[in-house]
Amino acid sequence: MSTTEHPSEETTEPDWSTVQASPEFQALRGRLRRFVFPLTAAFLVWYLLYVVLASYAPGFMGLKIGGNITVGLVFGLLQFVSTFAITTWYVRWADKRFDPHATAIREEIEK
Amino acid sequence: MTSPILNISIFAIFVVITLAIVIRVSRRASSGAKDFYTAGAAFSGAQNGIAISGDYLSAASFLGIAGAIALYGYDGFLYSIGFLVAWLVALLLVAELLRNTGKYTMGDVLAFRMRQRPVRAAAATSTLAVSFFYLLAQMAGAGGLVALLLDIKSKTGQSIVIAVVGVLMITYVLIGGMRGTTWVQIIKAVLLIVGAGVMTLWVLALFGFSLSALMGDAVNQAGSLGEKLLSPGAQYGKNGTTRLDFISLGLALVLGTAGLPHILMRFYTVPSAKEARKSVTWAIWLIGIFYLFTLVLGYGAGALVGPDAIKKAPGAANSAAPLLAYELGGTVLLGLIAAVAFATILAVVAGLTITASASFAHDIYVNVIKHGQVQDEKGTEVKVARRTAVVIGIVAILGGILANGQNIAFLVALAFAVAASANLPTILYSLFWRRFTTRGALWSIYGGLAITLVLIIFSPVVSGKPVDAATGKSPSMLQGVDFHWFPLDNPGLVSIPLSFLLGYLGTVLSKDKADPAKYAEMEVRSLTGAGAEKAVVH
């Protein structure tokens, strides 16, 4: 391995398996997976719905709902809105609900 | 109408300013590998987010999407949505965990709990493949851009310009490493987004800030296509195959981004997972806003320049945005936008080159050839990386000259398809699946890569599309031969699920079990950031 640039790094390896088995870590892991997996599934389904509609229902997507603004345009812009919203939601969740627990475990490991 | 001297002067000013900055920031750098690859992990989340958007918004994004919207209307918009939504995969599943477990390359994460040499070799192979296709697309794009902006029509003249772009890129990378490259990307992102923003406001002002009025005018200019501009299908709605092709493309776009090695490497330039999260947030906002601009610019070009004028211009669809700039602000604005487009190509190719050279030096040279036994103090690793950068630069120049005139969007789609098939399944399995093994990783990387390449070689993109009556040429890469048997242009629909399947099969068919201790270390580190690479304080 290339030599480390951080002389302060511990020489003894933490016991990762013990940390992994601890209830605190299992809770953290569950917390992350319960948040990101359903959310990922949701936005992928929402996106694929859009792609399938654009591909197989161009008539519906071409309906005008005011001036030259079509259902498809609104649908497309909603993909932008949902992407921005999920980003904001995730960052808030991660800052408030995930980071404090992750930091606590890390400090426990590194102390 | 173009003023080549003005265009070249504005671009030359950009080059001089960025070179000066690159030289300035590189003085602060140490000579170590960490500094060359990741700028000491010392960029802030905001800086890195801007640089990511600079890395991601390639010439294909700017010129290609605006052009596609101008000519095909709504169908062009579909690309930008895929390119944007894709970032959620990076944000939710990849960025932070990757930052916590890796050091310099994608291979660091993939090989973390596997047998180092085979997995690193596989990761480097796929990194080099993706980077090569992406690089080729950018260099080929430079040729087309030159034709339009500098009024250089001879192939020799264009080749010289491609060579100049390549040499400049090598210079940036050699002098500045990741630090210099990042600054070039930041400057370029700001110029590009501000430039597109000004043009967007300008176009909207001409139509009384009514998107509906703008689209109405675009429809009136569109001739036979007319109202079709407003709904999907102008490009992809012809028949069952093109519809399926569109789904395939949509899948590759949304799953490809989080597997692009040059994007992944950017997450190592920040000090922590939290900053990586901030980077992605910045990138999503900037990229999203930029794509909203391209929607207005595309319809604006359709309305103000007209599809006929765009199709007749030397760069065809790619010339929509520059022609719109000329229509709005004359030669000066055209010159500015031209310079921004060049800067775009330069910044993206520099990012790709540093990624590819890091992967070769760190994964192949240090870990595969030297079994990880390289003393960093002597700077051997960086020396290898620099030499690799020169080689890649030369290959890119030659490849770009050969690929000049090829369809840029196709090459980019190819890079995304390989990234989504070979890289993403392997990354997700490594991070989240306890049982994943070395064999699983090798099968999903090499299998994904091979399936993608085979399907593309035998797709209509390479051979067998019917001859277009208007141009007298087939839109396929090769003329006059037909050996295609795969019906779709984009392989994603088949190659992505198969790669996931191969990763699964390779794992359950492994004789060796996954190492539970290594998985424990990887999981704890990835979630908590314990033992993660720290920033270097100068």
Image (cartoon, rainbow, N blue to C red):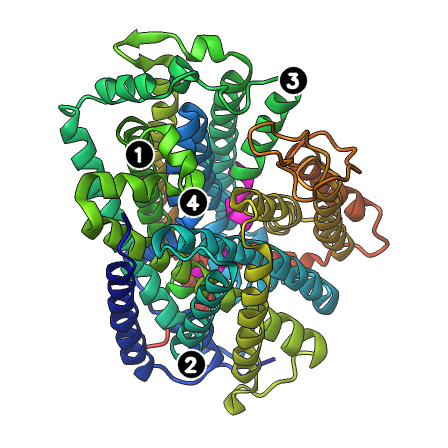
- Foreground of the two, B482 or A96: B482
Q: Is residue B146 left or right of residue B405?
A: left
Disc 4 and disc 1 on one polypeptide chain = yes
Cβ atoms under marks 3 and 1 closer than 8 Å = no
> What number is the disc on residue A19?
none
Query: Which chain is mark 4 on?
Result: B
Q: Which residues are magenta?
A: B254-266
Indicate whether B59 appears above or below B48. Answer: above
Q: CA distance from mark 1 to mark 2?
A: 47 Å
Circle 4 — which element?
loop
Query: Which chain is mark 1 on?
Result: B
Amino acid residing under circle 3: Gly
Q: CA distance from mark 3 to mark 4?
A: 32 Å
Residue that numbered label 1 is attached to: B292
> What number is the disc on residue B240?
3
Mark earlier in primary sequence (3, 4): 3
Q: Position of residue B507 (x, y in %)?
A: 77, 48
Mark 4 or 1, closer to the camera: 4
Residue that numbered label 4 is attached to: B314
Residue that numbered label 2 is attached to: A8
Q: Position of residue B14 (x, y in %)?
A: 27, 65
Disc 2 and disc 3 on one polypeptide chain = no
Amino acid residing under circle 4: Pro
